[in-house]
Image (cartoon, rainbow, N blue to C red):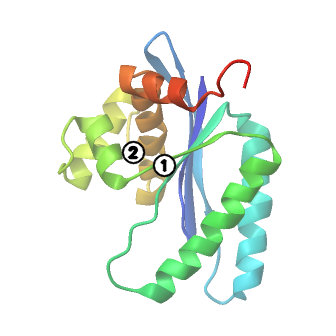
Amino acid sequence: MVVLGIDPGYAIVGYGGIEFYNNKYHTLGYGAILTKPTQSFDLRLEIIFNEMNTVLDKCKPDVMSIEKLYFQNNQKTAIDVAQARGVILLAAKLKSVPIFEYTPLQVKTAVTGYGKAKKEQVMEMTKRLLKLEKMPKLDDTADALAIAICHTQANGSPLKEFLNMRTLPAKGG
């Protein structure tokens, strides 16, 4: 399974593509889509959309895993990130890539086994699981790789399989 993990934003969109097969990880690539504060917001969204399409074309993911939005304070930032997230989801949807969303707590738990893990612990486990010599420079890119790992851990669980069975349409219905 090829998973494209996304850490959404409007200044930086982190992405990381991994392959998970026979309980082994292979890193396909990672990076960030960057926009400048001097650019108009609609241009920033266009850049994110176009570059996300390029990433999707190169990675050819079976699924996209993306972090759910969680904001305590700044509503303006939340709205702008939500708009960027929307164009990212649209790019995936237009390419028929299934989308799965995970909270930061779910990501920390899947990667480290502990929901209150510190950022450094998540990064260290991500590095170990993916056998990376060093973590990417940008935290957003490292977070995207952790989000991709989260999907591989959550997808095969008995609970997930049970929930998937419940959402299938009834036969003859």
Asked if 104 appears above or below 78 in the picture, the reply is above
Outermost residue toward the front in this view: 173
Q: Callout 2, which amino acid?
A: Met
Numbered badge on residue 69: none
Residue 137 lies left or right of residue 15; in this view the side is: left
Numbered badge on residue 135: 2
Are dots 2 and 1 in contact, CB under 8 Å? no
Report how far apart the C-alphas of labels 2 and 1 lie in the structure: 12 Å
Q: Residue at x 70, y 36 (%)?
A: 59
Q: Callout 1, which amino acid?
A: Ala
Q: Residue at x 44, y 55 (%)?
A: 137
Residue 168 at x, y = what percent? 62, 27
Numbered badge on residue 144: 1
Residue 24 at x, y = what percent? 45, 16
Q: Residues within 10 Å of mark 1 (few under 14, many from 20)?
A: many
Query: Which residue is more in the foreground, 74 or 140?
Result: 74
